[in-house]
Image (cartoon, rainbow, N blue to C red):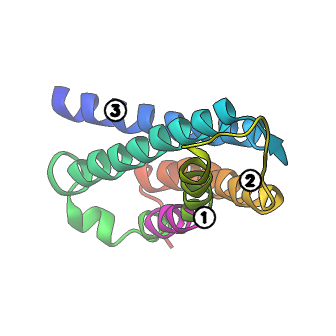
Amino acid sequence: MLALSLNTYLHLLSIITIFCALVAELILIQEEVNWSRIKRLSKIDGVYGIAAILVLGTGFVNWMILGKGAEYYNSNTFFILKIVFFSIVGLISLYPTIQFARLKKKHKSDPPETIQISKHKLIRKCILIELVIMSSIPLLAELMANGLNF
């Protein structure tokens, strides 16, 4: 029981970290940024990635080992939707991650005073979509945990 509680705690903490990272990225991304902001965005995106891996790992442990059993989860539509939504968020997150990595690599050797991010509006849209989809996942989790299904 303690293992389940600690694993679930780490799972929830990782989800909160993902939300915080997305909000931080949304705040920091602008059309024109300086080099330190690019480095900060890359670090935040790294934290986001680590948190996503922790969500997957702890979720897998709950699913297969500590939780209600794989049969319970596999037959629950809300669980399947959670997995699909989280996968969609992961796919969408690739675009901002690639853009941050490209900017960091491009300007690493000779960082200019300011850096133009030509695709900042698209990056912002991706982050907003991620936040909206991620916001629905806790509701799906609660419906699933309460035994609801359709």
Q: Name which residue lies at 53% across and 52% down.
A: 105
When the figure is inspected, residue 28 is found, relative to residue 59, above or below; the finding is: above
Earlier along the polypeptide chain: callout 1 or callout 2? 1
Pointer 3: residues within 10 angstroms few (<14), some, or many (20+)?
some
Q: Position of residue 146 (x, y in %)?
A: 44, 50
Q: Contact, CB < 8 Å: mark 2 with mark 3?
A: no
Classify mark 2: helix, strand or loop.
helix
- Cα distance in 3D space between marks 2 and 3: 24 Å
* Quadrant in which the N terminus is drawn: top left
- Cα distance in 3D space between marks 3 and 1: 27 Å
Amino acid, disc 2: Leu
Q: How many marks?
A: 3
- Cα distance in 3D space between marks 1 and 2: 13 Å
The disc label shown at residue 134, or none: none
Amino acid, disc 1: Tyr
The disc label shown at residue 128, or none: 2
Q: Name which residue lies at 55% across and 43% down.
A: 108
Residue 97, by quadrant, is: bottom right
* Residue holding disc 3: 10
Earlier along the polypeptide chain: callout 3 or callout 1? 3
Find the magenta span and give its range: 82-92
Amino acid, disc 3: Leu
Residue 43 drawn in magenta: no
Q: Is residue 35 left or right of residue 47?
A: right
Query: Can residue 30 be seen in the rendering of this structure?
Result: no
Q: Name which residue lies at 65% across and 39% down.
A: 111
* Residue holding disc 1: 95
